[in-house]
Amino acid sequence: MTIRKKGKGAASARGTTKRPRKAARTPRGYGKLPPREPQRISLADAVELTQRYRKAAPASEHAGFFWAEGLQDILSQAGCVGLRYYHGLGADGAYRMVLVGVDAQGNDITAPTSSKRSKVSAAGASGGAVLLDHHFPCPPYCPQGSPLL
């Protein structure tokens, strides 16, 4: 018969010590920033990646466009060290992309912050965090003569 004592680190009948239960853990890989490694690639690598994607999904969007002002508004939020994008679907089933700022702890900036810039766009004027959607898809908003298409 095994006798167990209640409480942290209680010894079992076998003489081993039970470890206290850990608090609920965040899923592996969540809640941290990736390593700071170069993210630039060559044009040749970019062409290869985009061609492979178009062959695999010929009916999909090839690209999307965001105006610089919105990107600058995200990056100018206090504590913003980068961008994260989320894939989404609109009510009509169309692909959507959501952009959000990320802080030094790897958290999405989804609550209001003070801006580093004195000028705040209409998107940030409401006092909330700046998030972007409504990219302009390619097609039809495609550049003429881009080697990536």
Image: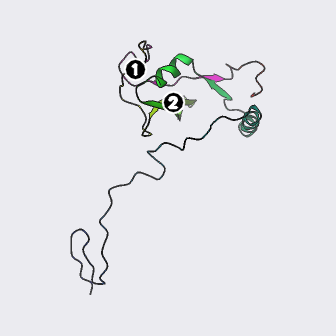
Callouts 1 and 2 close, C-beta under 8 Å: no
Note whether 18 is above or below 52 in the view shown: below
The stretch drawn in magenta includes residue 129? yes
> Looking at this view, is 22 or 91 the one in front?
22
Q: Is residue 64 left or right of residue 48?
A: left
- x, y percentage for residue 16? 32, 79
Residue in view at x 44 percent, y 37 percent: 104
Pointer 2: what residue? 98
Mark with earlier residue (1, 2): 2
- Whether residue 130 is visible here, answered yes or no, is yes
Q: Report which quarter residue 53 is drawn in.
A: top right
Note whether 125 is above or below 24 in the view shown: above
Pointer 1: what residue? 115
Q: Is residue 8 left or right of residue 110?
A: left
Question: Where does the magenta region start and end?
Answer: 121-140
Circle 1 — which element? loop
Between disc 1 and disc 2, the foreground one is 1
The secondary structure making up most of the magenta span is: loop
- x, y percentage for residue 114? 36, 22
Residue type for callout 1:
Ser
- x, y percentage for residue 14? 31, 84
- Whether residue 90 is visible here, answered yes or no, is no
Residue type for callout 2:
Val
